[in-house]
Image: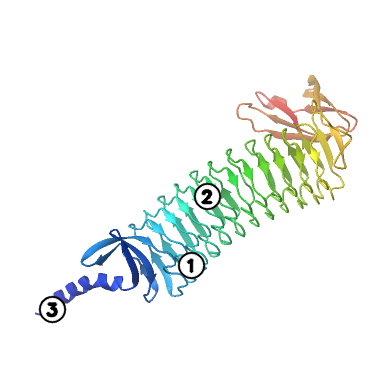
Amino acid sequence: MKTLFKLVLSLVLLLTLPAAVQAQFTFTTNNGTITITGYIGSGGVVTIPGTIVVNGVSLPVTIIGDSAFSNNSTVTSVAIPNTVTNIGTSTFYMCIYLTSATIGTNVTSIGSSAFDYCLSLTNVVIPNSVTNIGRSAFYSCYRLTSLTIGTNVVSIGNDAFYGCSGLSSVKIPNSVTSLGDEAFTSCLCLTDVTLGTSITNIGFRMFESCPLTSVTFPTNVINIGGSAFYRCGSLSSVTIPDSVTSIGFYAFGNTGLTNAIIGNRVISIDYNAFNGCGNLTSAIIGRSVPSLGANMFYSCSSLKSVYFLGDAPSVGPNVFYGDPNVIVYYMPGTTNWASTLGGAPTMLWNPQAQQVGVRTNSFGFRIIGTPNIPIVVEACTNLTSASWTPLQNCTLTNGALYFSDSRWTNYPARFYRLRSP
């Protein structure tokens, strides 16, 4: 009899459990589906049900509605079921003790400010089903240290991960075509970022104040927005690909750059683009740049060499202000060059190799050109997959120099080139 009583009691508990779970939520119905509109439970670990019984009919939970959990200070963990397709606006806004959120595998959209100011959230996996991450979706989740972005995300909104200062590494998948302004601003531990191949625009203040050590631009990027890398103090080198046509104001201002290469299709460089780069020693500017914005290299006090591959550009005021040692170098065959550019002296950079051959058991050649131009001699052993090694860094003090390589017999083949430092 006791065993039968226990069995009946267990069945009663099983039958009443869903109702108890349902009682934690307020919801509405729409076309046979459920939208969770609020949470009234006791907090702690919360599992949102995949179905809710309404009038004896089990209906799927498909939407976690706007502000459903906002400002809740009791929920520490939430599991969103696979039935859910949409997480609304400000759904978990200011859930300051939420440490864990499991997002179901059929969610396609994460709304604006969905997890905004979830100050204790440490790990987020955005499933492959998600295509859109809304504006400020994870704004100021400053304890977030691990982020996985699903491979079908197309759009990441403005400020999406602004102030996520615990993130050290982010991989943006190739599916992303739209990356909003300030998406990763003030991610103060972010040293490594991989940009997906479909990104065409690096938005305004995208990585401002991030300690990035390097950045590789995908070949589809057209625009680098204003202040995109402003105050990235650990960024030491940048190569801007030929796909890029415009560089915004302060795009690389106050960074740690020591050298910069600007691609051949850039036609617009806005004011202050490299302002305050005190470690910058050299820059190469591509063939298509028609003008330099005001203060472009303002207060780049270590700048010594700027190489122009095209014709002389027009320049705004104070382009080289505070750069006492800078010299502008231009290439043979380019036009409109005067003795100075923006107050900096100009020189023709035209090294040529002559008298190539073997001399006293060394292979060598004579280099001639404009007196006092700087040159680096490099070598490689395979032009198909060239890896160039610097052999000599020199200056044509009197307009001529003899270079020799005593190790040339150590290689089955060796090729040489002259480049700027």
* Contact between labelled residues 2 and 1, with CB atoms less than 8 Å apart: no
Amino acid type for the residue under numbered disc 3:
Phe
Residue at 53% over, 65% down: 143
In the rendered view, tell whether residue 261 sits above or below residue 6. Answer: above
Residue 149 visible in this rendered orientation of the protein: no
Q: Secondary structure at mark 3?
A: helix
Ranked by sequence position, the earlier of labels 1 and 2 is: 1
* Contact between labelled residues 2 and 3, with CB atoms less than 8 Å apart: no
Q: Is residue 203 left or right of residue 258?
A: left
Residue 231 location in percent, x, y? 69, 55
Q: Secondary structure at mark 1?
A: loop
Ranked by sequence position, the earlier of labels 1 and 3 is: 3
The chosen color scheme is rainbow
Q: Nearer the viewer, residue 288 or 142?
A: 288
The residue labelled by disc 3 is: 5
Residue 63 visible in this rendered orientation of the protein: yes
Residue 13 location in percent, x, y? 21, 74
Amino acid type for the residue under numbered disc 2:
Lys
Q: Among all residues in the image, which is located at the extreme right? A: 398
* Residue 79 badge: none
Q: Nearer the viewer, mark 1 or mark 3?
A: 1
In the rendered view, tell whether residue 111 sits above or below residue 372. Answer: below
Q: Nearer the viewer, mark 1 or mark 2?
A: 1
Instruction: Tell me which corner region of the image, top left, top right, bottom left or bottom right, holds residue 46.
Output: bottom left
The residue labelled by disc 2 is: 171
The residue labelled by disc 1 is: 93
State which quarter of the image contains the C terminus. Answer: top right
